[in-house]
Amino acid sequence: MRLHVGDAFAAALETAQGFRWKEYSPFFLILATQVVFLALATQLHHPWAMAVVAPVATWFGGAGSLHYPIFYGYLSVLMAWVEAFLYAIPGSVLIPLAILRLYARTDRALSLGAGAFARLAGAVFPTLLAGLAGVGCLWGWQRWVAPAAGPFIRNFIPGPSAVFLTWVVAVLGGYLTLSLLLYIPVAAVQARSSLPRAIALGLRFGVRALPVTLILAVAFGLPAIGIQYFLERQSSMILTKLRPETIAVLLAVYAAFTSIATYLTYGMAARLYRMARGDS
């Protein structure tokens, strides 16, 4: 398959200009679940909210994490796990669905529903494996690679700049993982695909397109990255000088920006993959 850098930017521009609610709605379902969970997290004085949030919070942070206002300092970590679960598990169905709806624009058979369910069903397991692999790789990156990068960076760049660069390395790990695995769901929804074929072709194309995919994924994600940085650097200030509930509001905005960025990234990837195959 041919791959031109210009095609990637053309695909990104076409995705941004060609927004359609039907194609974005699967990502919106994930966003809506996150917002509902955050809304419940601000109502822990009600038994019905506690019944939903407490089991998840105590699973990851222990019973002590539920105390006010400590809970809001921990909420960013909790929502990271909720986000990972939603994009990996329900996302294994919703992400291929969004890609198939995009392809239905130019594929008459798909637009009429012919074979769409079979292609969606065949894409679920490869997408699930890619999502779980992404969560595992990101966890390993955050646990081992990013902490090891800190002392190395401080050997060359002292002071606050080293702290910032270490944080950048940690964040880029997530985008690097996404960029490598991004094309597995795209390959999985193609006609006559299979599990081995989707993984092999998706990973191979992900490696070939890695530089430009990483650049565009980060560009789409910049608003979310900015909020993430603010929350990680200023959470103590928010807890002590502002209302702790402000963190929940900012996390909702972060989730919205992430949802849109994810839609744009997959839309770009789906178009670029078709361009490289010569289908458009």
Image (tube, helix red, strand yellow):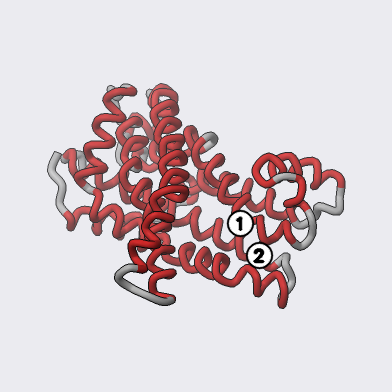
* Residue type at the position of mark 2: Ile
**Marking on residue 15:** none
Q: Residue at x 43, y 51 (%)?
A: 262
Q: 10 Å neighbourhood of mark 2: few (<14), some, or many (≥20)? A: many
The residue that mark 2 highlights is 247
Position of residue 217 in the picture relative to residue 2 (left or right): right
**Residue 16 in view:** no
Residue 213 lies, in percent from the top left, at: 28, 52
Residue 217 lies, in percent from the top left, at: 35, 56
The correct choice, above or below, for 55 with respect to 142 in the image is: above
Residue 89 lies, in percent from the top left, at: 53, 34
**Quarter of the image with the C terminus in it:** top left
Q: Residue at x 42, y 65 (%)?
A: 222
Position of residue 227 in the picture relative to residue 118 (left or right): right
Q: Quadrant of residue 186?
A: top left
Residue 21 lies, in percent from the top left, at: 49, 50
**Residue 228 in view:** yes
The residue that mark 1 highlights is 76
